[in-house]
Image (cartoon, rainbow, N blue to C red):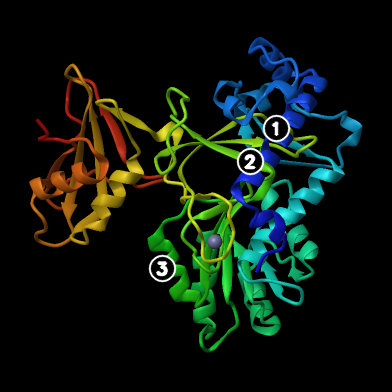
Amino acid sequence: MMFQPDAESMPAEQRAKLQEERLRGLIDRLLAAAGVQAGRLRAAGVERGGDVRLADLPRLPVTEKQDLWAAYPFGMLGVPRSEVVVFHGSSGTGGRPTLVGYTRHDLQLWSQVCARALAGAGAGPGSIIHNAYGYGLFTGGLGFHQGAVELGAAVVPVSGGMTPRQITLIRDLGPGILACTPSYAIRLGEALAEAGLRPGAGLSLRAGLFGAEPWTAALRARIEELLGLRALDIYGLSEVIGPGVAAECFEAADGLHVNEDHFLVETVDPVTAAPVPEGSAGELVFSTLTREAGALLRYRTGDISALRREPCACGRTLVKMSKITGRRDDMLVIRGVNIYPSEVERVLLGEGALSPDYLLVVDERGDGRELLALCEYRAGSGPAQDVLEARLREVLGVRIGVRVLPAGAVPRTEVGKAVRVVRWAGGEPPVPGLA
Ligand SMILES: [Zn+2]
């Protein structure tokens, strides 16, 4: 089911024309707003939108999160402050959030793209949507809320926390759709099971839209088992609009359709910013083609994903992005190849015999950087080191050394976020006995 079938299943050529027209409009609005983006456009030789073609995109200037922080609170608005009707934000730096403004038009656009995501999960007029995203400055709760109202569904604005009350509402109201973070979906699923509500025994949920955190295929399987629903990924960030930038469809559930008629998407090399071919992992970059207050040209997200164009069972012609596989800031460059620790983890943990405790050592003692993966067998034995090395090389395209250590030898993090990557520039090895 599609909320806006004309836009979502538009032939690619027609959409490209629309994108080019809208890109020109965005550039004209930015030039008129005379902010930092206008200055950069003029420095790049762009004096009017009409001169720009879609193919020129890679040579246009980019924006980054630092630009929003530097211009806090109102400096990046594409319209006069008085036209803003809502502010949202996300975690920032130095006590200041990353603040984003919305005009009435921006809010309507946001409602529509969230309605698209909900319809893609099978919701429609009459559906009940249990919305356990936090309501507030964060965009999750209100984004879904407005999308549900736009769709004509009934939204239960339960927000996050107070799990016993959530269980009562799910039991009594029988929602078909759940919206929350993937980690809260697990928590809720376990609490529902404890309360005797299981798939096929009192649970009515058919689909869930889970986002705001990166999550894996393994977590998808666990959520689906616990809640008996189709677990779909949804992507968004407040700088671009909030949830609704991209979402998976119920039919395929294997990649997120980007609403590219409004959010023009590119993938670039995180280091050089050069375009990467479709199908290869790169940093997601969005231009908000139709935003007024939040008008951004080529916003670098820092999120790593791959784009893919293919016919989908749902009928949408919108490009698909893979699940987020890493963050630009986590990237390691090993012999010219970009490696994300999450990719190494996926290969290692795909070997059922290995313990989830592992450590990546970036060996910087020699001329080049070498990567060494330290791991342990879960019980007794597992594949030999050279088998693991061959597997990593096959998947990642670069040599990564593997060392299997005795049980307990990989250092554990007792408090806070686990440390998975350490640098070894010289002196004592990070783990005793490592030569
Ligand atoms: Zn689809």
Residue 288 image-quadrant placement: top right
* Mark 3 neighbour density, 10 Å: few (under 14) some (14–19) many (20 or more): few
Q: Residue 147 placed where, x, y %?
A: 74, 59
* Disc 3 C-beta below 8 A from ligand 1: no
- Give the structural element (helix, strand or loop) at label 3: helix
Q: Earlier in the sequence, mark 3 or mark 1?
A: 1
Q: Amino acid type of disc 1?
A: Leu
- The residue lying at 67 percent from left, 53 percent from top is 140
Q: Residue 332 placed where, x, y %?
A: 33, 31
Q: Residue 59 placed where, x, y %?
A: 56, 20
- Relative to residue 23, is residue 50 depicted above or below? above
Q: CA distance from mark 1 to mark 2?
A: 10 Å
Dot 2 and dot 3 residues touching (CB under 8 Å): no
- The residue lying at 46 percent from left, 51 percent from top is 323
Q: In this figure, which residue is indicated by the disc labeled 2?
A: 16
Quadrant in which the N terminus appears: bottom right
Q: In this figure, which residue is indicated by the disc labeled 3?
A: 221
Q: Amino acid type of disc 3?
A: Ala
Q: Amino acid type of disc 2?
A: Ala
In this view of the protein, which residue sits in the foreground, 317 or 292? 317
- Relative to residue 232, is residue 29 depicted above or below? above
Compared across the picture, whether 83 is left or right of 132 comes to right
Quadrant in which the C terminus appears: top left
Of the four image quadrants, the one with ligand 1 is bottom right
- The residue lying at 66 percent from left, 77 percent from top is 175
Residue 261 image-quadrant placement: top right
Q: CA distance from mark 3 to mark 1?
A: 39 Å
Compared across the picture, whether 265 is left or right of 406 comes to right
- Tell me the tag on residue 23: 1
Compared across the picture, whether 142 is left or right of 217 comes to right
Q: Earlier in the sequence, mark 1 or mark 2?
A: 2
